[in-house]
Amino acid sequence: MNNQSSQPESDTAASGGGDFPVRCLSFSRAGRIVQECSRGPHDIDDALEQIGLITDNQRLVFRECVFNKVLGQGCKISREDIPHDAANTLREVRDTVSDKSQ
């Protein structure tokens, strides 16, 4: 029986053959997207405000960049799922993008 999926190939596989969802984006790829959109490199534990994304508009531009790059990888994510408050860290954004991308 052929179990080919129509979803893009992930560089993170489910372990143990259980019913765990396979991420569309690995932490590594999600991290690169977040760094690119924040014009990094920045420390992963820095908050968006600390890296210069001060205004709401700057953070909306960042969120839109992340959203578009996720789509560019053949994955889906809701804009509302991408954290972009001033106090959110790049780690929080990376983790969420990796977890929520399908």
Image (cartoon, rainbow, N blue to C red):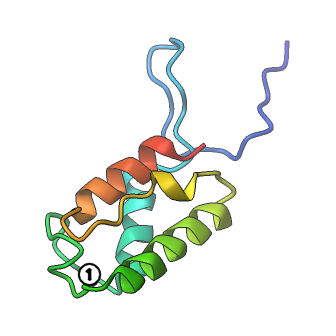
Q: Nearer the viewer, residue 12 or 33?
A: 33
- At horizontal 56% and vertical 66% (from top left) the residue drawn is 67
Name the residue: 45% across, 60% down.
Answer: 29
Q: Residue furthest front?
A: 56
- Element carrying mark 1: loop
From the viewer's perspective, is residue 73 above or below residue 10?
A: below
Q: Position of residue 38 (x, y in %)?
A: 35, 81
Q: Residue at x 58, y 52 (%)?
A: 78
**Mark 1 = which residue?**
41
In this picture, residue 25 sits left or right of residue 1: left
Up-down relation of residue 19 to residue 87 (above or below): above
> Could you say where residue 52 lies in the image, as x and y percent from the top left?
22, 88
Circle 1 residues within 10 Å: few <14, some 14–19, many ≥20:
few
Closer to us: 40 or 87: 87
Q: Is residue 4 left or right of residue 42?
A: right
Front one among 88 and 26: 88
Question: Disc 1 residue type?
Answer: Pro
Residue 63 location (% of width, % of height)? 46, 71
* Quarter that holds the C terminus: top right
Q: Position of residue 13 (x, y in %)?
A: 51, 33
Q: Quadrant of residue 2?
A: top right
